[in-house]
């Protein structure tokens, strides 16, 4: 019904002798619909996927290294710079784009940062040597597998490689 109203309003405006363009606000006023109504209509029209808080699929990180034509993640961090030197310390972690990278007992771990339960950014816990979601308390092992739920899906794990005598860290698929 609302879709028919929208289509009719568009058709009326296209056939109108008045050639001035409508602003978004004017268009919505002519429809008599609030933004909340339009958002509800949008959500229903997309099978509710656009408004769902559930994260059934693991988020795929962007390629922080940029370019190259390949969709595979592959970048190198310079651990001598202020942005990344904290990673040389056991137990430290940082968020880089869609990844969490941690120094877990001298071993570098790179995982997707979004909890597979509802997408909240996770953190590394040195004392437990695991990753924990602060939202609903899912816990993940350093290999990304679920230790305790409510999450049921593992986090995507990425390869790491130490280069140049420990001064660079490569993260890749």
Image (cartoon, rainbow, N blue to C red):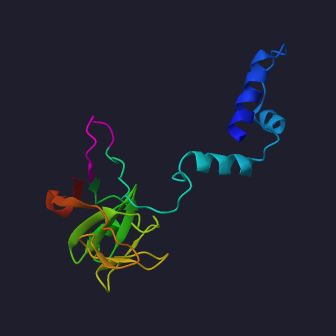
Residue for point 35% across, 72% down: 152
Q: Quadrant of residue 142?
A: bottom left
Residue 142 placement, left or right of 39: left
Residue 143 placement, left or right of 32: left
Q: Nearer the viewer, residue 46 or 162?
A: 46
What residue occupies the far top of the structure in this picture? 17
Judge whether 79 appears above or below 14 on screen.
below
Quarter occupied by the N terminus: top right
Residue for point 31% across, 45% down: 65
* Residue 73 forms part of the magenta stretch: yes
Residue for point 78% across, 22% down: 13
Q: Position of residue 146 (x, y in %)?
A: 30, 75
Q: Quadrant of residue 56?
A: bottom left
Q: Position of residue 16 (x, y in %)?
A: 82, 17
Residue range corresponding to the magenta coloring: 66-76
* Residue 69 forms part of the magenta stretch: yes
């Amino acid at each position: 019904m609302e879709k028919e109203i929208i289509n009719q309003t568009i058709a009326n405006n296209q056939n109108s002798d008045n050639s001035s363009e409508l602003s978004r606000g004017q268009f919505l006023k002519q429809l008599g619909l609030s933004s909340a109504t339009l958002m509800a209509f949008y959500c229903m029209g997309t099978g509710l996927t656009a408004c769902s808080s559930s994260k059934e699929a693991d988020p795929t990180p962007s390629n922080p290294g940029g370019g190259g034509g390949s969709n595979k993640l592959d970048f190198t961090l310079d651990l001598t710079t202020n942005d990344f030197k904290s990673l040389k310390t056991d137990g430290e972690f940082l968020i880089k784009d869609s990844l969490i990278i941690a120094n877990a007992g001298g071993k570098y771990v790179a995982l997707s940062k979004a909890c597979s339960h509802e997408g909240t950014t996770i953190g590394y816990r040195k004392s437990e040597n695991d990753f924990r979601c602060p939202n609903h308390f899912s816990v993940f092992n350093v290999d990304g597998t679920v230790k305790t739920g409510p999450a049921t899906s593992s986090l995507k794990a990425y390869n790491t490689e130490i280069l140049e005598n420990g001064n660079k860290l490569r993260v890749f698929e």
